[in-house]
């Protein structure tokens, strides 16, 4: 069995020009499939709020819910690095509280790192977490927790600000940064300049790695899909087919047939 992906593995992959793969997961069965397939990073994203809980955005997700889902994911993984996504307002305000919340992902949920959104404004929190031995992945560009401030889920094009945010989170001690909803030419510049790894979502091919929300990528989510999502499977279609067949057979009295009965 291959050894677990760590922050050093990712750094080496960047140096060797090997692409990093990442997907989200929120439970034991899917995390197991991802781990066995050889995904480098599993993010227990706060996209949980939208694709699992059916909410309009990621803001209502709580610390306890994130810890619960991250524990299920970590239990299934022996290869992938598990990253817990810090919910909205769990790393703002007091730095001590932010470090305590980040620590819960490693201590209680078995994660190997945490992710949080923002640039310069969250650097003191990144620095305090990294100084406490907690690996931090930053997330800049289109940051869904700021949906109301951004006036919607909008592509971010302010090159100077994006470059500065990327430099700031690296200087604060982040080991990696997610680039979301950024024109490819800007992510290419950021990726070239930074020593840490860049993981793109709607940020073009030049990033060191790519991430998608699992439920979008394998067709579990049948709600709106952004332009950057490629659908690799139709899991909802296959599941619905099976469910409809079950309903048909039960109604017709064909299930359970003799082979499924106890003698
Ligand atoms: O919550 C999430 O799933 C994310 C990814 C889209 C990067 O933050």
Image (spheres, rainbow, N blue to C red):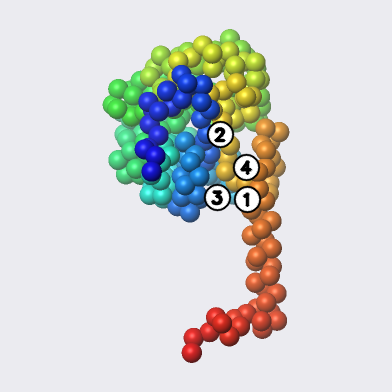
138 up-or-down from 172: above or below: below
> Mark 2 vs mark 4: which is more N-terminal?
2
> Mark 2 vs mark 3: which is more N-terminal?
3
Q: At numbered mark 3, what does the secondary structure look like: helix, strand or loop?
A: loop
Q: At numbered mark 1, what does the secondary structure look like: helix, strand or loop?
A: loop
State the image quarter where residue 56 is shown: top right
| Crowd band around label 1 with a 10 angstrom C-alpha radius: few (<14), some (14–19), many (20+) | some
Which mark, residue 53? Answer: 3
- Measured in 3D between alpha carbons, the distance from the residue under mark 1 to the one under mark 4, in whole angstroms, is 8 Å
Task: Determine the residue located farthest toward the bottom in the rendered image.
Answer: 263
| Crowd band around label 4 with a 10 angstrom C-alpha radius: few (<14), some (14–19), many (20+) | many
Quadrant, the N terminus: top left
Which mark, residue 217? Answer: 4
Q: Is residue 60 left or right of 153 when viewed as pictured?
A: left
Circles 3 and 1: CB atoms closer than 8 Å: no
Ligand 1 under 8 Å from disc 2 Cβ? yes
Q: Which residue is mark 1?
A: 220
Circles 4 and 3: CB atoms closer than 8 Å: no
Residue at position x 60%, y 46% in the image:
215
Q: Residue 166, position in %: x, y?
A: 50, 16
Q: Which residue is mark 2?
A: 211
101 up-or-down from 141: above or below: below
- Measured in 3D between alpha carbons, the distance from the residue under mark 3 to the one under mark 1, in whole angstroms, is 13 Å
Q: Is residue 188 left or right of 9 when viewed as pictured?
A: right
Which of these two is toward me, 16 or 240? 16
């Amino acid at each position: 069995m291959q050894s677990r992906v760590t922050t050093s593995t990712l750094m080496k992959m960047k140096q060797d020009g090997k692409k990093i793969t990442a997907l989200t997961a929120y439970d034991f069965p899917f995390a197991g499939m991802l781990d066995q397939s050889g995904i480098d990073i599993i993010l227990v994203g706060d996209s949980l709020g939208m694709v699992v809980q059916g909410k309009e955005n990621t803001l209502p997700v709580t610390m306890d819910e994130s810890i619960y889902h991250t524990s299920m994911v970590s239990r299934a993984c022996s290869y992938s690095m598990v990253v817990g996504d810090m919910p909205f307002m769990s790393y703002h305000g007091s730095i001590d509280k932010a470090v305590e919340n980040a620590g819960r992902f490693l201590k209680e949920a078995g994660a190997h790192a945490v992710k949080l959104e923002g640039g310069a404004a969250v650097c003191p929190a990144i620095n305090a977490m990294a100084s406490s031995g907690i690996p931090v992945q930053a997330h800049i560009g289109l940051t869904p927790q700021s949906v109301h401030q951004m006036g919607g889920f909008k592509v971010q094009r302010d090159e100077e600000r994006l470059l500065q945010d990327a430099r700031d989170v690296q200087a604060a001690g982040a080991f990696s940064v997610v680039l979301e909803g950024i024109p490819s030419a800007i992510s290419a510049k950021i990726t070239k300049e930074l020593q840490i790894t860049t993981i793109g979502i709607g940020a073009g091919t030049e990033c060191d790695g790519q991430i998608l929300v699992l439920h979008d990528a394998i067709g579990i989510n049948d709600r709106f899909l952004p332009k950057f999502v490629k659908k690799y499977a139709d899991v909802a279609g296959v599941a619905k087919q099976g469910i409809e067949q079950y309903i048909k057979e039960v109604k017709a009295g064909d299930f359970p047939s003799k082979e499924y009965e106890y003698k």
